[in-house]
Amino acid sequence: MDGSDETAAPCGNFDPYNINSTDFNPDLYLQRVFKEYRLTEIMDREQQIHREIQLLDSEMQRLVYDNYNKFILATDTIKKMKTDFQTMEQEMESLVENMSKISVYSGNVSQSLHKRAQQVANLNTTSTLLNRLQRVFELPENLRKHKKSGQYVQAVALFTSAESILSQYSYIACFKDIHSECLAIVDEIKVKLLERFEQRHVNVKELSEAVQLLHELHEPIEKLCAQYLEQAAISLNGDLAVLVRQVSLARGDSSPAPAGLPPELHLLHSTPMDVQQFVDHSCNSFLGNISLIIASYAQLFVAGGSGQTESTIMQQQQDFVRSLIDDYFKLVADRIEAERRNNNTEVCVKALDKTFRRVQALNNLLLQMDLNTKVYEVIQKAAEDKAEFYLEEMQAFIVNKLAELRHELIQPFKGSLSAVLVNLEAAILEKVKYVLWEMRHFVSPDVTFASSRAQFRNFTSEHLIKRGLLGKFISFTADTMRSEYCDLNGNPLVQLVLSKLCLDLRHSLVKQVFRMCDDAVETQSMASSRLPAEVQELVCSVDSLAEEMLQGFVVRSGDVISNMLRKSVDARNWVSCAEPRNVRAVMKRVVEDLTQLDINIGELYEEGSRRERSSDSSRRTYPYSQRWGPPSTGHTECSMLPNLNFNKLFSEKIEIMSKVEPNRVSVMTGVIKISLKTLLECIRLKTFGRFGLQQVQVDAHYLHLYLWRFVQDEQVILVLLDEVVSSSIHRCLDPVLMEHSVIEVISDRG
């Protein structure tokens, strides 16, 4: 009963108020209830206790009923087991009795049959022998039936099972006749089996069956291998004949296809294929067939072989494949070479990649031959041919561009040299970029043969493209410029532009080209970021070529100005000329040409450094009249010579053909030195009168007014013009100098 509403005992485990406890005291409990609960609560409690008593009574009745049923079932089971054990004892006794009787009967039977056992064994042996003899005598007829119905497996099995008996008793006439007859039938079966080797569409299962049966019939395995390969070679040579014809068509052969071919073969021999179709056809025909033949050969002859025979068989197969595959690779190389002059590198690479994948699958069947090396030789040859073709194309391109440059810069040139140079360099870079984009297909990660062998990728990118293609192109460009444009008879503007091109190659273009190469071939190694040693040496030689070009430009430009000065000096009568009233026209033309030349050089080269002019006013105007003073009446050349010679002692020696630096003022200084030196030498060959000397004074002063701004050091012009006037005084019959103020007026008016 539930006593959860009761309070706990005041001490220990003793609780007289817990109705579920063994210490329960009804009197104490009732006293407490009457004392603590009201009447309604007592009545409710009474009803609750009554319900609990009824619930406990019903549970007790159910438990008693369940246990009673279990006792009844247990009693029945015990009674049944007692009955079953009694029956089993009776049956076991009966079984023992029966077994004893069987043992007695078995002993009696064994004793009865023991006397006839030997007779039964002899009869059984005789019956077996008679059955064998019957099969032997029926063997020829059975062989004919199986041969006629094509059941060669059963025929060979019958013959091999009886062959030992026929051979053993062949001295008996009847057995000898049967043996001979069977051998004749077996020979006919061999012929039928060998005919399978000549059938083109026979499957591998039938061939395997034929080989197995012929081997059981003691046919030499080497002979079977040779015959199988001989028939296979006929089919494969037919595939190669189609490829040979396609190579001829690709090379421009217009001869008709051979007569008597089947329609499908006639179409293959008469319709040209592009390189992709050629490779697809070769992979589907030749490589597909030879792969099937190799797999069949291994299944037919190699599997199950052993020792020396297997080695001989494998050697026969390798010799067979080697001769055919070499012809195939040569045809593929020839067909790819026929595409050498076409800009279809991507198509060729895809064709080579498909060939590589098919050969790789074939190589898995012939690991001893290493066909991958052979196909890489074909691919490398194709890459070298393409690199050589693009090199020739780039060489022709640069030759044409230089010829166009020469034609464009024909005098008089009115355009912009900087624009010409920019266009030329842009065209070169664009051409190089195009070629690199085409060659990158050989080393693309998407191409199987490039990603499978890093050695090939490195060889192609480093050797073929960088050294073989770009390096040789730069070398050819430099050699072409040196041989055709570096001579002194060329157009000076062409030499000027090419000198700047060489400097740009030296400092930026070559590195830019090789960066483009690294980007194109996706080179990640640190070594690839540096220029190859050969190219670095080539770049240094380009630097020297730039110096030669610039020096040639200076000499050629100076020669042009010198020719004008020489002709002007030679054409004038300096002894009897009139008093100078103006600057000669040729001097104006010289200044104009030098000014235009300075503008052209300034478009390509930086200004360069100058030496500051002296603040001495005597250096800013032409000093000859002041240096020697106005000539007095009666002065002669002889009286002035000591002063002139004395002044030369303190003049700086000018090196006319000094090295030219790649800047504007250095180049102009070189041109002006050559021009003034020519003027000086021409003056030394002439004889002057008074007015001729004064004309030289005016011309020299005019040149000084305009030329000092073009040179690095004004002293160079002063010294050379000083020598010009000095030489004129030496060669003058009446050396009377013009007043400096008059010279300035004439020069300003000019």
Image: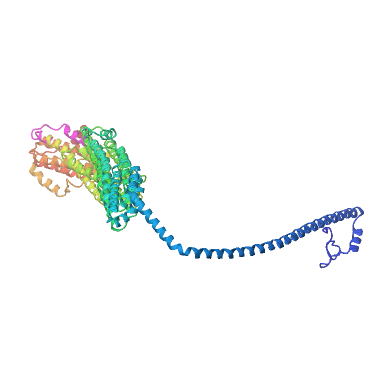
Q: Position of residue 18 (x, y in %)?
A: 84, 62
Q: Determine if residue 137 is in view.
A: yes
Q: Position of residue 129 (x, y in %)?
A: 37, 56
The quadrant of the picture occupied by the N terminus is: bottom right
**Looking at the image, which residue is at 32% across and 57% down?**
306
Q: Left or right of 686: which side holds 212?
A: right
**Looking at the image, which residue is at 27% across and 56% down?**
171
Task: Decide whether residue 596 is among the magenta residues.
Answer: yes
Quadrant of residue 636 in the image?
top left
Between 32 and 627, the one nearer to me in the picture: 32
Q: Determine if residue 612 is in view.
A: no
**Magenta part of the chain:** 568-597
Q: Is residue 224 above or below residue 80?
A: above
Which residue extends farthest bottom? 12
Quadrant of residue 387 in the image?
top left
Between 747 and 656, the one nearer to me in the picture: 656
Q: Position of residue 244 (x, y in %)?
A: 24, 39
Q: Position of residue 618 (x, y in %)?
A: 22, 43
Q: Left or right of 704: which side holds 643?
A: left
Task: Decide whether residue 495 is among the magenta residues.
Answer: no
Quadrant of residue 285 in the image?
top left
Between 659 and 180, the one nearer to me in the picture: 180
The quadrant of the picture occupied by the C terminus is: top left
